[in-house]
Amino acid sequence: MKHFLLLLLILAGAGVCNAVQKPTSSKFDKRMQYLAYNGYNVTQINAKVGHVTAINFSQDEVIVDVVIGFNLGWETTDNNNKIFLKPMAYKYEDTIIEPNSAEWDTNLIVTTNKRIYTFDLKLVDSDDNSYLVNFTYPTDERNKKQALLKEQKALEQEKLANDSLEQFTQPKNWNYTMLVGKDSESITPDFTYDDGVRTFIGFTSEKTIPAIFYYQGKQEMMSNTSVKNTEKYTIIVVHKTASRFILRSGDEVVGIVNKSFGKSVQNNQVTSNKDIIRNIK
């Protein structure tokens, strides 16, 4: 009994190892076929004497190499993402050898710029031959759909952030001073304020928009920012408040000091200092 079960397992394993993938026929015409690409499967293509079979790969693929086992008995022509197959007779010495289903089976390997395809070519006498075989790519389509959903989610989050920025609360703290380095006038902001959560740094169109850093201990850290454009200003929205910000562009540097950082600011309270105090070094 054990030997019998072992034999069944061996036969089953052999069947799996030699299994081929056959295209699915269209409901409109069985000779028009399709199948999902699987790089680990061999695809069986049935051809017939006097007929051409076309295999259609993805639109973004280009065939770069075609190798067939029995090149004397098969004609192959490729064009971009398509390959055309036809069984043909060949001459051996003074004899013409006509295609026959007993001796014409072979394999075909097609390499494109993206994938490798492996085929078993079968010559059939019946009408069970393929006219057109279209490959589909469920994994690619799924990845594209996931990428699209991710992009849509990012756009929604960006819109949500922009909508949130549209609802500017009344500035709660204008109490900022600015220290401008030598020859750094082009990156000086025209205003700075915060709403208790975010810091808004505005520049007119003639200014250069700098990179913005904040201090974490004694280390400068890159700020997480977004941008809002108004008719007159480009506003860099820093997604935090801090005691100090450093603005840099090349050799230019500007320091911004939040003089009210850490102080309690009541809702709708605006400090009396509505202009940036500019301390030029």
Image (tube, rainbow, N blue to C red):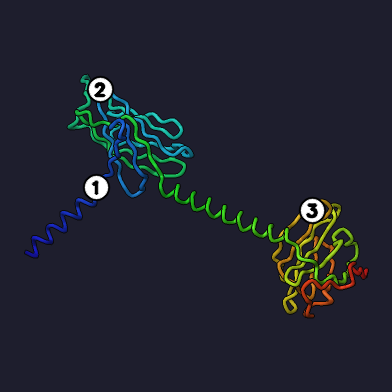
- Quadrant of the image occupied by residue 3: bottom left
Q: Do the residues labelled 1 and 3 touch (CB within 8 Å)?
A: no
Residues at marks 2 and 1, CA–CA distance in whole angstroms: 33 Å
Residues at marks 2 and 3, CA–CA distance in whole angstroms: 80 Å
Front position among marks 2 and 1: 1
Q: Dot 2: few (<14), some (14–19), or many (≥20) neighbours within 10 Å?
A: few
Horizontal side of residue 146 vs 40, given as left or right = right
For the point 28% across and 39% down, the residue is 44
Mark 1 vs 3, N-terminal side:
1
User: What's the mark number on residue 230?
Assistant: 3
For the point 78% across and 59% down, the residue is 235
Percent position of residue 138, x then y: 40, 47
Percent position of residue 40, x then y: 33, 50
User: What's the mark number on residue 168?
Assistant: none
Q: Quadrant of the N terminus?
A: bottom left
- Quadrant of the image occupied by residue 155: bottom right
Q: Quadrant of the C terminus?
A: bottom right
Badge 1 amino acid = Ala
Percent position of residue 145, x then y: 48, 50
Q: Do the residues labelled 2 and 3 touch (CB within 8 Å)?
A: no
Q: Is residue 39 above or below residue 192?
A: above
Q: Name the residue under label 2.
A: 91
Mark 2 vs 3, N-terminal side:
2
Q: Mark 1 points at which residue?
A: 19
Residue nearer the viewer, 70 or 203: 203
- Residue farthest right in this picture: 280
Badge 3 amino acid = Thr
Question: What kind of element bears circle 1?
Answer: loop
For the point 82% across and 77% down, the residue is 260
